[in-house]
Amino acid sequence: MATLLGCIADDFTGATDLAGLLARSGVKVSLRMGLPTEPPVDTAAFEVIALKCRTAPLDEALADVFAAYEWLKKAGAQRFFWKYCSTFDSTDKGNIGPIAETLMTKIGTKQTIYCPAFPENGRSIFMGNLFVGEQPIAESPMKDHPLTPMKDSNLMRLLQPQVSKPVGLANRLCVAKGPEALQQRLDELKTQGVAHVIVDAVANEDLFTISKACQDMPLMTGGSAIAMPLPMLYLEQGLLSADAGKTEIPHLADKAIILSGSCSAMTRAQVANYGATAPSYRLDPLELAQNGPKAALDWLAEQNLADSPLVYATAEPDQVKAAQEALGVMKAGELVEEALAALAVAARDQGAERFVIAGGETSGAVTQALGINKLDVSVEIAPGVPWSFCETAGKKVALTLKSGNFGSEGFFTDALARLKELEAA
């Protein structure tokens, strides 16, 4: 069938997050890992393309987004969604704003919204300010993010330097009045020349209000949660039918690997929790710079993958800073990504068929190394983190890609247990 909604995500975990929330509706969702190399054939109503452009140089990011847009347009997409992280982490130059503005020009629309709120995961926006739980994001651990530290919580101030047209706000008081009031506010801002509108949301009810008001926009932007109500709204409009069957659960070997590159506060807690009882190995960027991943690969070769070992580069902010000062920010990250990608391939070749990956950059590196280009999205382990099934080197595997701050402290254990529940069912 023709694609109704074409989605472009700025990293692989974010794309999986978005696909999982859309799949809650029961409507078929197809997730493409990286730019598709084949013309669109037998596409789903919801097509999600996962790029790796959150921290890429802007010209490269724009080129990839343009190519993804062209593929989705050929697939028949009638509406578009630009998905970025619920923490809105970016830089003074982008890439969130420039990509949105480029898509607006390509699509031919004069206004879009920005709503990275994800209340189920503690992300909310009030009076234009982004919160993580009860903390303004600039006071949260995101202030120490190794690549995109968040030093300001005000989304309007963050976005304005990234775009060429005015930024405005539709605040919580407006959203609370319902879809018609929000539509009126957006129209007022449009007459004032405001092209980019931050929209407040503090609860799931707000997401439904916003989606209902904006469902006919040619382009929406935000975190994954703002897209969650869209399938239901499209079904109500008669634009699509619930034609998706259940994702088939393949028979998999009981061998697993957990790979973590994220240095977020929650992933640090998850690594500590899981590593207390499971075999684990920590990657040191300084050692990788000198000797490569040989020691880690040798360690992995000695492991029984039925014990689901963990390999991680997750570290405290001061450790990350020290490595970046010694190697450079980009080089330190590249060394870790390359090592984790090599470990994923080695684990696959040792028989691993269950992969738990933490961190957006790590997920991109691992899926590319495994040659994975399409995922069948299944049920969630935690809000925004589903199990998916795919093929690598001719065999079926299960894969979950987790954004850094998502999930509870016991996520790694929960993920493996949830997969066994699926198989048993």
Image (cartoon, rainbow, N blue to C red):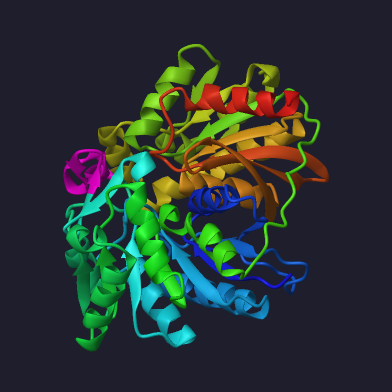
* 190 vs 251: above or below: below
418 within the magenta span: no
User: Residue 177 falls in which quadrant of the image?
Assistant: bottom left
* 375 vs 424: above or below: below
How many numbered marks have been drawn onto this rendered protein structure? Answer: 0
Instruction: Report the quarter where the N terminus lies.
Output: bottom right
Extent of the magenta region: 131-145
User: Residue 132 falls in which quadrant of the image?
Assistant: top left
Residue 117, x across and y down, in percent: 33, 52
**One can see residue 333 in this view:** yes
Q: Is residue 296 left or right of residue 224?
A: right
> Residue at image x 26%, y 61%?
175
**One can see residue 304 in this view:** no
Depth check: give the residue in front, 55 or 332: 55
* 102 vs 85: above or below: below
> Residue at image x 37%, y 29%?
268
Q: Is residue 359 left or right of residue 205?
A: right
Residue 134, x across and y down, in percent: 20, 38
What residue occupies the far right of the structure in this picture?
394
Instruction: Report the quarter where the C terminus lies.
Output: top right
> Residue at image x 28%, y 38%?
322
* 369 vs 261: above or below: below
Residue 99, x across and y down, in percent: 40, 73
What residue occupies the far top of the structure in this picture?
277
Residue 313, x across and y down, in percent: 44, 34
Depth check: give the residue in front, 327 or 265: 265
Depth check: give the residue in front, 147 or 70: 70
